[in-house]
Image: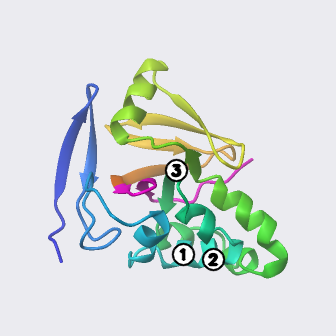
Amino acid sequence: MPSHRLVYLTLAAASIPLVTTAALSHNHKAGAKSAGNIVAGVSASKDHKTLVAAVKAAGLVDTLASGGPFTVFAPTDAAFGKLPAGTLDTLLKPENKGTLTSILTYHVVSGKVSAKSLVEQINAGGGQAVLTTVQGGKLTATLDSGKVVLRDQSGGTATVTTADLMQSNGVIHVTDSVSLPG
């Protein structure tokens, strides 16, 4: 297991802390290349078991394992734990597959958006970048103390805790909260 250490990557006059932990597995460090796809990347993570179960329940495994490229803002198990009691159990029921799919695809953006590119978009946008998700909704990215923060359409925020986990079909950015469409 690698040690938990904080490294800084200076991007477009902003510093985004990138935590090189076992966020997606001991083989994945921020900015590292991976031979696996997005599904393989999150499946290897001890911190993304809930996300993997949700992706399977929504029937999105084949889509997220396909060519892409995709940018995935991947909430940790702890992030799912912040949802109100019973919410996750309800979402995982077969009759709620549509709602679950909508929430999960709200965490996905078409194309490969690196941390550097996202910070450049934020700076070019006067302090914010609006990302259109695969679900069709919008996520607004800003910087707060050098960290990328996503504001969802419900007014919630999620901070990127680990960025640029490169996969064969895109990139994963780990977040500390679940983003919800409006």
Amino acid found under the numbered disc labelled 3: Phe
Of residues 94 and 182, the one nearer the viewer is 94
Residue 62 placement (x, y as % from top left): 61, 68
- Residue 56 numbered tag: 2
Mark 2–mark 3 distance (CA, rounded to whole Å): 17 Å
Q: Residue furthest front?
A: 67
Quick one: label 2, few (<14), some, or many (20+) residues within 10 Å? some
Q: Is residue 1 above or below residue 176?
A: below
Q: Earlier in the sequence, mark 3 or mark 1?
A: 1
Q: Residue at x 56, y 70 (%)?
A: 80
Within 10 angstroms of label 3, few (less than 14), some, or many (20 or more) residues?
Answer: many
Residue 70: image tag: 3
Q: CA distance from mark 3 to mark 1?
A: 16 Å
Residue drawn where x is 54% and y is 75% of the image: 52
Q: In the image, what residue type sits under mark 2?
A: Lys
Residue on which disc 1 sits: 52
Q: Which secondary structure lies at badge 1?
A: helix
